[in-house]
Amino acid sequence: MPELAEVEYYRKRWHQAAAGQPVERVRAHAAKKTFREASAARIRHGITGAQLVESEAAAKQMAFRFDNGAWLGVHLGMTGELSAQPTGYRPQKHDHLVIEFPKISLVFTDPRMFGGVRFHAGPEAPDWWTRIAPDLLSNAFSQKALDDFLQRRAKAPIKAVLLMQERFPGIGNWMADEILWRAEIHPAQPAGTLLVNESKRLRREIRAVCRNALNRIAGEGDFIPHDLNVGIPNTWLFNHRWQDGGTCPRSGVPLERADIGGRTTCWSPARQVLRPNRP
DNA sequence: GTGCTTGTTGGCCA
DNA sequence: GTGGCCAACAAGCA
């Protein structure tokens, strides 16, 4: 489910529900996998009694910070979700972590267990947080940084390259398709063969899609998880890409779908044309 | 039963 | 060593 903007949405949801309150009890039911290198016991000891004070989202990850210096990191994987539930909430089958506060319980749910929870004690940011690539809306994401990366991954299809978190933190499958559709670049085009104008358009649309998605999904709107199209207008590819018989919202032609870079990819053949390689 | 799925990782191979 | 590809992880849904 979650890419950049949805992650920010879930962060807010937890933060607004519990910031300023002390943790009364931690119930950790997860398989070892969910807690990565941390353990359920370590998380329990690490945050019980501490107050949630700060939180941040970056790429597809979140960090929740407590007044004793503890860091709780959350990655939602493909199917993870965060919710706030009334006190006395009974954990369901796929609820791996429940943090009980005086007035609310925060719940991490993840049926497929591709997500995970990390823990760190101490005021300095942990590796798993500092290693995240610079924000795509920051100045660090320059045209040169983009072009250098495209050259380094010259032979890979641009779609696959956009999914590489080391340079495009927070971009997931649907955002990648949306960006390429707007930039009028075929998803199978090798990254190293983009023309100067295409690479400029690509950078512009990466930023536009990130900015717009954040505004629409993580803003004050009425976004509902599982019903993303409430927040995203029909002028985007997003609302058309999964339907059988979906059509391009700009040209009206039937959309195409294929496996590119190992992921289902959707594009508009009217706007996105594969160019033969030039020597 | 089949064949999908908004993600990441490690192993294999050129 | 680097880059590219792919299976695996696990569960739900149509």
Image: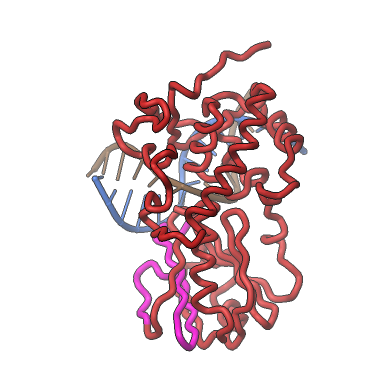
Chain colours: A red, B brown, C blue
Q: Is A233 positioned to the left or the right of A25 in the image?
A: left
**Quadrant housing the C terminus of chain A:** top right
Front-most of A271 and A190?
Answer: A271
* Image coordinates for residue A101, horizontal then vertical, percent: 49, 84
Q: Is residue A13 above or below residue A191?
A: below
Query: Which residue is more in the foreground, A164 or A205?
Result: A205
- Which residue is depicted at the point 57% across and 41% down? A163
Q: Which image quarter: residue A171?
A: top right
Q: Is residue A145 visible to us here?
A: yes
Query: Looking at the image, is A206 positioned above or below residue C12?
Result: above
Magenta-colored span: A89-115
Magenta stretch holds residue A83: no
The percent coordinates of residue A95 (x first, y second) are: 41, 70
Is residue A90 positioned above or below A237 on the image? below
The image position of residue A97, as x and y in percent, is 47, 73
Residue A94 shown in magenta: yes
Residue at the spot x=43%, y=56% of the render? A79
